[in-house]
Amino acid sequence: MFERKIKIIEDFLGSYYKSKDEFLFYCPKCKHHKPKLSVNIDKDVFKCWVCDYNGRTISHLVSSYGKGHNRSEWKSVCGIVDMSDLEKPEEEKIIVTLPEEFISLTKKIFCGGRLVIALTGSMPRE
Ligand SMILES: [Zn+2]
């Protein structure tokens, strides 16, 4: 995911330098001869150290300077990120106290990405 984002930006801003957590691209605004546009994928921010061109989200940079296919690809990549950022539903746990002679027919069923434990069985008749 991370690399895909860098690839998209690289496609319209050109080569970059990596320093610590940031990627330094050539600034499309001031076109400084050194890569001064710092892009932080983790924080989703960018800033040019020369002309102070910045934005709250990298998608702003992509929509301003990216080509059509860059924008659509960015959207699809971010769409996937949003999905994985969603909290995974906790496994539903059903705790029941059952007599030893209970015939357990517990089945684990995945339904739409959610783990559903279906309890089927019958209590022994007295
Ligand atoms: Zn700049």
Image (cartoon, rainbow, N blue to C red):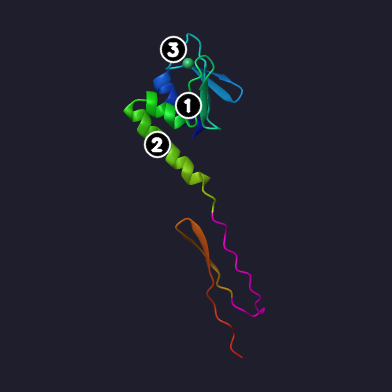
| Stretch in magenta | 89-103
Give the quarter of the image for residue 117.
bottom right
Indicate left or right for 15 with 96 as reference.
Answer: left
Q: Is mark 1 on a helix, strand or loop?
A: helix
How many residues crowd around disc 3 within 10 Å: few (fewer than 14), some, or many (20 or more)?
few
Residue lying at 32% horizontally and 28% vertically, measured from the top left: 68
Which callout, 3 or 2, points at the residue further toward the start of the chain?
A: 3
Q: Is mark 3 on a helix, strand or loop?
A: loop
Does the beta carbon of the residue at mark 3 sit less than 8 Å from ligand 1?
A: yes
The residue that mark 2 highlights is 75
Residue lying at 59% horizontally and 85% vertically, measured from the top left: 124
Q: Is mark 2 on a helix, strand or loop?
A: helix
Tell me the kind of residue under disc 1. Ile
Q: Quadrant of the C terminus?
A: bottom right
As drawn, which residue projects farthest toward the left?
68
The residue that mark 1 highlights is 6
Q: Is the magenta stretch mostly helix, strand or loop?
A: loop
